[in-house]
Image (cartoon, rainbow, N blue to C red):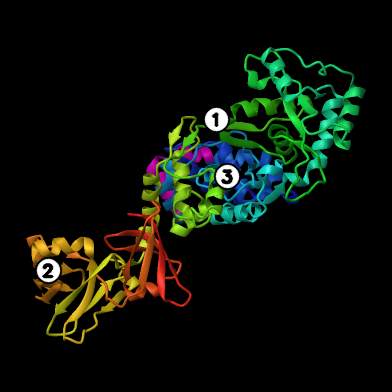
Amino acid sequence: MPPPEAGAPPAREDALAVARKYALQNAVMHGGSCQVGPVISRMLGERPDWRPHARALSPVVKEAVDWVNSLGPDAQLGELDSIDPALAVKETHERDHALPDLPGTEGGVVMRFAPGPSGPLHIGHSRAAILNDDYVRRYGGRYILRFEDTDPARVMFEAYRWIREDMDWLGCKVTDVFEQSDRFDLYYEHARRLLAMGAAYVCTCSPEEARALKEAKTACPHREQPTEEQLARWEAMLDGTYPPEGASVTIKTDIADPNPALRDWVALRISEEVHPKTGSRYRVYPLYNYSVAIDDHLMGLTHVLRGKDHLNNTLRQKWIYRYMGWKEPYFHHYGFVSIEDIVLKKSRIKEAIDAGEFLGWDDPRLGTLRAMRRRGIDPESIRRYWVEASIRPIEIMFSWKTLFAHDRIVQEPRTPRLFFVADPVELALASPGPLEARAPVHPDRPDMGVRHLVLPKAPGGAYSAVVPSADYPAIEKAGRFRLKDLGNFELVGPNRARHIGNDLAILKEGVPIIHWAPPGGPRTAVHTPEGATDTGISEPGALDRDSQFVQFERYGFARIEVARDRSGIEAFFAYR
């Protein structure tokens, strides 16, 4: 994406107004103190046409920062509220969980998310996707989605589309998309340059021999061969002279480095496996650290966020930057996250899907984002979780409970209520008049309306309702019970009761409150993350909630899918 064309310098009054807004926002986020750098970054994110004049903006921004820092925290919030009330509310709510500022962000940032297309994204991938997106939103700039698809054995053709869909669902605003399989000519060009400058060599040792030499801190016998010979051997790699594993391009580092992982490392290797996208066009494939270093530079990366498990990779990639004389991006390594109680490994999932063990990539037992979406989890909840976890270097254990707590905060205020009766037991209810209920769609939201539920009358004269079989022992023990939002009843025989009024005072006696449904409601199957399926009956209004997230009262939150012929419902459980 080309930079915006330079225009006239901004009017001082306009620049000062924008500077004050973002200085106030920065101060509210950080306990009453703001700094020039983050303010300039946010200004240029809003007004990219001002980037050519970033240096000239500094005095205006400093004036705004000095003024804001002279105010107390309450005054700062009041001023921000007068300028942008929505921003004030947002920062008041989120200031304790905002990500820390990054250095070197003047003029915006270029960041990337770089998955391998071996399947759709899972909850672990969402961390890097969201953190990078959050910073690009803050500072302005470009957000690159780069498919790292240089290993033919780990490419699934459908995954290119799935990953883009997952990113859209997360709300990540990608500006540029690249596929490494389209960039082999660039990797070859830089390999020749590195060989020509003596920074790399073509090794024809077997993998076992090369490994033994590195472990012994001994140089490969091909390491110092003349440049002409290195380039000739490179061409032989390309033309088919060497078989797979017969030769590799290796980057020279410190062969005596105390860390064995950093001693001479392989950059390109020979493979004749057919690539799902490029077929047999190439036989020399770049490996991870080599292609990443080349692409991060050519794509203009300013900041690289990655887990601490990539520390050695960062050190390897820096050798390329030093040899080529490139400016390094800012590297930040956050702590490793452990995610338990869920299947994440894509190869294992694919095998299980092929064997019929899972319903598909969106099976509720999986940790894929497609499974999260099918269960009705709001992506804003996932964003809040990772922003709160931040980019600290400490290792963390992912908590599903915490994620669901975030989701409840996001969704509960707007989620309609419904009755679902699992493993139903039918009750005959005697009543002198019709039995019908007007239950709120949401107990705290009168504006969402009511659910009108009517019980049918059986030929024998009694009305009929179904209740959960798990609740029937409590009904038998208490003798009296309340059907929620319908009325009070007294058991008069097996599966028979009579209506005894609607006085809520009965609740003071501790009678059980039971949820229920008309017996003719849609048959419903609720699939749980544990692999179980609860079957039963939902209230009729559930048929009008296709693809919606609902709360089945006294059961849990779930997303509904209505059959095309409206013959029944499948629901995918989220949490209690």
Picture mark count: 3
Q: Of the residues under marks 2 and 1, which one precedes in the sequence? A: 1
| Drawn side of residue 146 relative to residue 559, left or right | right
Q: Is residue 93 a member of the stretch shown in magenta?
A: no
Q: Which amino acid type is shown beneath numbered disc 3?
A: Ser
For mark 2, give the secondary structure: helix
At which x and y percent is residue 564? 48, 75
Q: Which amino acid type is shown beneath numbered disc 1?
A: Lys
Observer-side mark, 2 or 3, equals: 3
Tell me the number on the disc at residue 347.
3
Cα distance between the residues tagged 1 and 3? 24 Å
Q: Is residue 68 a member of the stretch shown in magenta?
A: yes
Q: Which amino acid type is shown beneath numbered disc 2?
A: Leu
At which x and y percent is residue 118? 62, 47
Q: Residue at x 29, y 59 (%)?
A: 555
Answer whether residue 132 is visible to the viewer in this image.
yes
| Drawn side of residue 150 relative to residue 75, left or right | right
Q: Which quarter of the figure is the C terminus placed in?
A: bottom left
Cα distance between the residues tagged 2 and 3? 56 Å
Answer whether residue 49 is visible to the viewer in this image.
no
At which x and y percent is residue 53? 70, 43
